[in-house]
Image: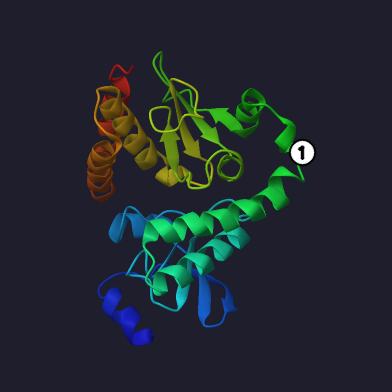
């Protein structure tokens, strides 16, 4: 296993932060998600396993070293199910569909039922997940909100990660961009740039896959050229949006 790590990370910093636990044959690790998104794969989000991200060793499960730690148990259950199915030849789409069902069941027991959230209507649920408005990045066309990512995943969409906007997610009110509170302040602007650019392209009629791909390209460029990030983000936020 050590040999595999050296091959994968030759010339790079290893992303490991802390071992969470061992679930034989797996070791579960907290990893530096920001480093991975900048240097290995910008699509890495809250967690991953080898058959989704081949740079992860086979006997390891990776969880982003996020600000909010309460979701680790959900992610581990998800990863174990996803890994098992994909190792048996299932497609990622089939594996994540099954793993999502398991994760949703656990989230409902641990979060939604315990907090009585199943009785709230959509309006009050939206008010519950919003934490604070980023006035610096909001304008007459769009409001940028920091939201409780754990609750968004538990209530609205289990695969919500990093951020989203009203052109992709129907549960997000019109004219809003949401940023997951699990994202560090240091990384927040990269995610906002991605979401703002993607939203602008979709507002002009571009399909999600194409808009996402182009937004990932710009995000990746700015991660490697952070000196242009503020200028690029400001230009993006000044664009008129529907």
Q: Which quarter of the figure has residue 229?
A: top left
User: Position of 53 compared to 24: left or right?
Assistant: left
Does residue 183 lie above or below 59 as drawn?
above
Kindly tell me whether residue 99 is visible in this rendering.
yes
Q: Residue at x 40, y 55 (%)?
A: 34
Does residue 16 lie above or below 194 as drawn?
below
User: Relative to the observer, which residue lies in front, 8 or 213?
Assistant: 213
Q: Which residue is mark 1?
A: 116
User: Position of 82 compared to 130: left or right?
Assistant: left
Kindly tell me whether residue 47 is visible in this rendering.
no
Q: Residue at x 49, y 28 (%)?
A: 172
The spot of residue 6 in percent (x, y) is 31, 81
Question: Outermost residue, top direction?
Answer: 140
How many C-alpha atoms fall within 10 Å of the one at disc 1: few (<14), some, or many (≥20)?
few
The spot of residue 2 in percent (x, y) is 37, 85
Helix, strand or loop for disc 1: loop
The spot of residue 55 in percent (x, y) is 32, 70
User: Position of 30 compared to 212: left or right?
Assistant: right
Q: Residue at x 61, y 34 (%)?
A: 129
User: Relative to the observer, which residue lies in front, 172 or 38?
Assistant: 172
Q: Residue at x 55, y 60 (%)?
A: 75
User: Relative to the observer, which residue lies in front, 189 or 2?
Assistant: 2
The chosen color scheme is rainbow
Does residue 229 lie above or below 37 as drawn?
above
The spot of residue 216 in percent (x, y) is 27, 44
Q: Which quarter of the figure has residue 242?
A: top left
């Amino acid at each position: 296993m050590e040999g595999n790590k050296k091959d994968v990370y030759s010339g790079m910093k290893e992303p490991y932060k802390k071992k969470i636990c061992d679930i034989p044959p797996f070791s579960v690790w907290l990893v530096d998600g920001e480093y991975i998104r900048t240097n290995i794969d910008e699509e890495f989000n809250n967690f991953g396993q080898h058959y989704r991200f081949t740079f992860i060793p086979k006997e390891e499960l990776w969880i982003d070293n996020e600000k909010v730690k309460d979701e680790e148990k959900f992610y581990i259950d998800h990863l174990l199910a996803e890994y098992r199915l994909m190792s048996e030849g299932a497609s990622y789409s089939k594996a994540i569909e099954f793993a999502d069902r398991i994760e949703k069941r656990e989230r409902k027991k641990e979060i939604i039922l315990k907090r009585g959230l199943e009785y709230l209507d959509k309006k009050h649920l939206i008010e519950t997940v919003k934490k604070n408005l980023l006035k610096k990045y909001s304008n007459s066309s769009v409001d940028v909100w920091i939201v409780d990512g754990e609750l968004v995943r538990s209530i609205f969409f289990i695969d919500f990660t990093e951020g989203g906007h009203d052109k992709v997610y129907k549960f997000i009110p019109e004219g809003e961009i949401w940023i997951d509170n699990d994202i560090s302040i240091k990384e927040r602007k990269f995610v906002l740039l991605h979401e703002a650019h993607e939203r602008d392209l979709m507002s002009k009629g571009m399909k999600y896959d194409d808009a996402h791909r182009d937004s990932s390209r710009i995000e990746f460029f700015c991660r490697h050229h952070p000196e242009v990030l503020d200028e690029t983000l400001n230009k993006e936020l000044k664009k008129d949006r529907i």
